[in-house]
């Protein structure tokens, strides 16, 4: 009797536990999810979120509300998120590398820390591309490097922002090639095409999207990805040309640190599936789709932190 | 030509026209609400366009854009609050007109000017896009610096009485623009160890604070609305429309000048509608036979501002569609939509996908035309509401809307706080004669000037005398000379008058 009784209890408990677990999983998501973009509408992060929104809603079966909280190159939204977001999976925020690495190093009061959240996934990568005007005397990366060696500081390279992916790309090129160029920050990607086409700078370091966009109106000398970007098959990588530079911006999404694993997994799957569905639309624009999750996230952050830390610290001591 | 006809046919469907009508109406109301800008209107609308065909989506966005830029004029005229930054200059004369009981005249003039401006912009875009696009890339950092300096000389004409107080206002504005992460260099400035301040002070927040709050406070202090309640239309609405129509078209110089200024500034990347309307206003004043009447209810000021900012709508698409350079902030969203539909800016856009592109451009022309009925009818409605509502209802309602609008801008309570602080400060500054306009001008142009200057200096590190880079080419030299002339024309009369060398200037000074 006791045996059966015990078995029964165990069975009931097991069933209950399974049921509860099942219930807990089925519960998420039952409310609308807020997806904060820490930048202005119209940028790469925003456009991507717009691509994702309908698919995420379909997969997760709930509303996903994209809101914007721009300011301080993302820092305002990130510090607010780390201070106040609830770890229940109903608040998530777009995160960008190198921003979340560089800002806490460069600013004593960025208001957030690189590791103080759970990054669900990095869903794409936009490598840096080196773009020069059509009339530029430089036809290859070697031309540019040779000229820069002869004429320190004379080559001006524009890019979006300071200590941004573009800026760090230029600093790495300087180290790798042993040259000294002048970096000129612009506010955002918007003014860069004009800077190239109007010959206001010798060239620009910007994301692969702009490279694709300007394929006909400018020369794209190199791209900072592991392999050639599908949308620009003729453009060599820095690696092929002998410079070990892989970098650009990784975009992903994060939730508060203590968010339950089940919720994180659910979001991870949803973003992966969304990524597969929007590949056809994003790849031709120059995006490199990625499925970086869990340990790989830490690996990517660690690798880039190692690459950027000395550059950033150098820059800081010069300030 | 075939392409044009095909494009025309593709938008002249019931569905197409309804899209435009709804878009214009929605844009108008969003634009009229302070805090909701054209950029935001487009961002909010964006997800709805996903279910539409590319052309229909673009038509809807173009219509909303057109409506929003125009809608800003309503609040500018009726409650001295620019609904969007592009309507700042509309308040200068539009609101004084409203106080004189000529609100509907001002609205009618703004409507007609916007319609003409919108159509002119479309015409430029259709006919002259490729050559104009070349002009867009000529403006480099040095040129931008001079453009901003030229704009700053406006302070003299906006100062309204005391040049010193105008300059003080401008300096306050420039200082406010430096709060937050610096555009170049990336340092945080004046954030007082308070991370949320990294976001800086957004123009529109300052705009609402400095324009609306003081107006509300003085309404409350005076105990009556700022518009006369017996604000009846003399001879009805149609008479004012006819009167304004005659005024605008019989002496079209102002209109033509403003449209040209609008088009040129629209294609300079990074300037946008707010700079456009300010410069057009200033030139209207400079070339007027009676400059001293500006700021006191001269309808030409309204016409200059509103025609030039609506030229900007289609005009700023010139660099966008041909080169992928957004001429004004809302264009960045249109660029996103184009890319999303696999359309790459460039000349292909006009040939390979010409039907779509021309359809989009033409639809903006239709949107401009539709401003006329929608604006004149909607204008009467809003006009009546503002006039008829007792101020003790109107005042809290406006206060509520501005607070919501400010919050909605970046989902930030801090912005609401900043808005209120600036508002109270603005009220007292106004009492001592420092007005909102020069402050806002300083905020807009201070950032542009700083960026242009620093970028130029960075590029010139190898030059022996770096600042010579500022006057390196013909265009920058011309602009620099214009700045000098503009500053001189502002300062000379006063100086001569003080020296007693110019009797005429002296006597004018006394009468004004």
Image (tube, coloured by chain):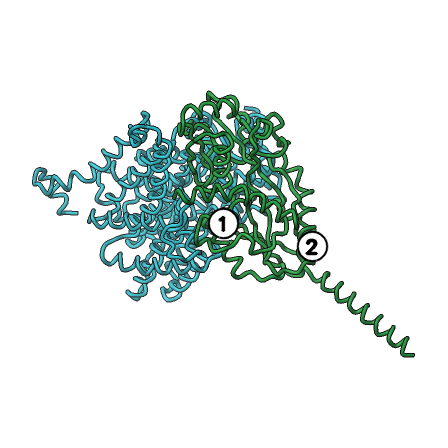
Quadrant location of residue B216? bottom left
Q: Which chain is green?
A: A
- Number of residue marks: 2
Residues at circles 2 and 1 in contact by the CB criterion of under 8 Å: no
Q: Mark 2 highlights which residue?
A: A266
Label 2 neighbourhood size at 10 Å, few (<14), some (14-19), many (20+)? some
Q: Position of residue A305 (x, y in %)?
A: 54, 45
Up-down relation of residue A316 to residue A28 (above or below): above
Disc 2 and disc 1 on one polypeptide chain: yes
Label annotation for residue A155: none
Query: Hey, which residue is sitting farthest bottom in the picture?
Result: A1
Residue B132 in view in this figure: no
Q: Please give left or right for residue A198 compared with residue B352 in the image.
A: left
Label annotation for residue A74: 1
- Real-space Cα separation, disc 2 to disc 1, in angstroms: 26 Å
Q: Position of residue B331 (x, y in %)?
A: 48, 39
Q: Please give left or right for residue A219 compared with residue B72 in the image.
A: right
Q: Residue at x 62, y 48 (%)?
A: A297
Q: Please give left or right for residue A217 compared with residue B168 in the image.
A: right
- Say whether disc 2 or disc 1 marks the residue closer to the N-terminus: 1
Between A305 and B471, which is closer to the camera in this rendering? A305
Between A291 and B317, which is closer to the camera in this rendering? A291
Quadrant location of residue B283? top left
Q: Position of residue B493 (x, y in %)?
A: 15, 39
Query: Hey, which residue is sitting farthest left in the picture?
Result: B500
Q: Which chain is cyan?
A: B
Letter of the chain that mark 1 sits on in the rendering: A
Between A78 and B36, which is closer to the camera in this rendering? A78
Q: Secondary structure at mark 1?
A: helix
Residue A281 in view in this figure: yes
Q: Position of residue A52 (x, y in %)?
A: 63, 46
Up-down relation of residue B223 to residue B355 (above or below): below
């Amino acid at each position: 009797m006791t045996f059966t009784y015990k078995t029964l209890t165990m069975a009931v408990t097991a069933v209950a536990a399974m049921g509860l677990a099942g219930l807990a999983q089925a519960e998420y998501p039952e409310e609308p999810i807020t997806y904060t973009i820490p930048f202005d509408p119209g940028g790469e992060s925003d456009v991507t979120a717009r691509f994702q929104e309908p698919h995420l809603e379909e997969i997760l079966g709930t509303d996903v509300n994209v809101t914007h909280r721009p300011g301080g190159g993302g820092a305002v939204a990130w510090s607010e998120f780390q201070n106040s977001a609830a770890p229940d999976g109903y608040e998530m925020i777009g995160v960008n590398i190198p921003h979340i690495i560089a800002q806490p190093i460069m600013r004593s009061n960025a208001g957030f820390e690189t590791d103080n959240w759970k990054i669900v996934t990095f869903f794409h990568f936009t490598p840096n591309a080196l773009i020069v005007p059509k009339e530029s005397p430089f036809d290859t990366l070697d031309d540019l490097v040779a000229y820069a060696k002869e004429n320190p500081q004379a080559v001006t390279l524009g890019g979006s922002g300071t200590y941004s992916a573009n800026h760090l790309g230029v600093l790495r090129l300087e180290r790798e090639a042993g040259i000294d160029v002048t970096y000129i920050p612009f506010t955002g990607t918007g003014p860069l095409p004009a800077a190239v086409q109007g010959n206001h700078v010798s060239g620009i370091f910007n994301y692969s999207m702009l490279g694709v966009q300007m394929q006909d109106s400018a020369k794209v000398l190199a791209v900072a990805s592991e392999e050639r970007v599908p949308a620009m098959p003729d453009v060599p990588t820095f690696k092929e040309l002998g410079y070990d530079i892989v970098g650009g911006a990784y975009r992903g999404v994060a939730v508060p640190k203590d968010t339950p694993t089940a919720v994180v997994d659910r979001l991870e799957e949803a973003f992966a599936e969304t990524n597969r569905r929007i590949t056809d639309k994003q790849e031709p624009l120059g995006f490199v789709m990625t499925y970086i999750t869990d340990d790989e996230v830490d690996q990517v952050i660690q690798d880039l932190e190692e690459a950027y830390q000395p550059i950033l610290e150098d820059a800081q001591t010069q300030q | 030509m075939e392409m044009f006809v095909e494009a025309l046919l593709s938008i002249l469907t019931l569905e197409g026209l309804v899209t435009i009508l709804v878009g214009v109406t929605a844009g108008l109301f969003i634009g009229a609400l302070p805090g909701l800008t054209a950029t935001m209107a487009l961002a909010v609308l964006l997800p709805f366009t996903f279910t539409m065909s590319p052309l229909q989506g673009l038509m809807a966005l173009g219509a909303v854009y057109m409506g929003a830029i125009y809608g800003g004029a309503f609040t500018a005229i009726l409650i001295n609050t620019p609904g969007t930054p592009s309507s700042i200059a509309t308040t200068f004369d539009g609101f004084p007109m409203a106080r004189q009981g000529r609100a509907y005249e001002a609205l009618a003039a703004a409507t007609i000017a916007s319609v003409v401006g919108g159509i002119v912009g479309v015409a430029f875009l259709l006919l002259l896009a490729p050559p104009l696009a070349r002009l867009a890339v000529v403006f480099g950092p040095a040129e931008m610096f001079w453009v901003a300096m030229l704009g700053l000389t406006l302070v003299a004409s906006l100062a309204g009485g005391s040049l010193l107080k105008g300059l003080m206002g401008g300096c306050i504005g420039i200082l406010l623009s430096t709060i937050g992460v610096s555009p170049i260099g990336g340092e945080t400035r004046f954030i007082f160890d308070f991370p949320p301040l990294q976001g800086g002070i957004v123009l529109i927040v300052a705009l609402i604070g400095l324009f609306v709050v003081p107006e509300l406070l003085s309404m409350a202090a005076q105990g009556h609305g700022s518009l006369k309640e017996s604000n009846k239309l003399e001879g009805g609405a149609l008479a004012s429309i006819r009167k304004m129509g005659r005024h605008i078209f019989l002496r079209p110089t102002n209109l033509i000048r403003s449209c040209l200024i609008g088009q040129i500034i629209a294609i300079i990347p990074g300037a946008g509608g707010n700079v456009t309307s300010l410069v057009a206003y200033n030139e209207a004043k400079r070339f007027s036979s009676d400059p001293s009447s500006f700021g006191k209810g001269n309808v030409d000021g309204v016409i200059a501002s509103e025609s030039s900012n609506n030229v900007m709508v289609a005009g700023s698409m010139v660099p966008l569609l041909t080169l992928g350079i957004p001429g004004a902030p809302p264009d960045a969203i249109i660029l996103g939509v184009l890319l999303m539909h696999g359309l790459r800016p460039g000349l292909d856009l006009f040939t390979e996908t010409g039907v779509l592109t021309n359809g989009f451009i033409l639809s903006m022309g239709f949107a401009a035309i539709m401003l006329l009925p929608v604006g004149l009818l909607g204008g009467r409605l809003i006009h009546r509401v503002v006039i008829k509502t007792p101020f003790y209802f109107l005042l809290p309602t406006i206060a509520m809307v501005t607070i919501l609008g400010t919050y909605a801008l970046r989902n930030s309570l801090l912005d609401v706080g900043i808005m209120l602080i600036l508002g109270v400060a603005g009220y007292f500054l106004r009492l001592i004669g420092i007005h909102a306009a020069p402050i806002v001008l300083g905020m807009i142009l201070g950032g542009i000037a700083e960026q242009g200057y620093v970028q130029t200096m960075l590029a010139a590190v190898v030059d022996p005398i770096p600042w010579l880079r500022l006057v390196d080419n013909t265009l920058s030299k011309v602009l620099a000379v214009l700045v000098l002339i503009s500053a001189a024309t502002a300062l000379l009369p006063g100086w001569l008058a003080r020296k007693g060398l110019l009797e005429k200037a002296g006597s004018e000074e006394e009468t004004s």
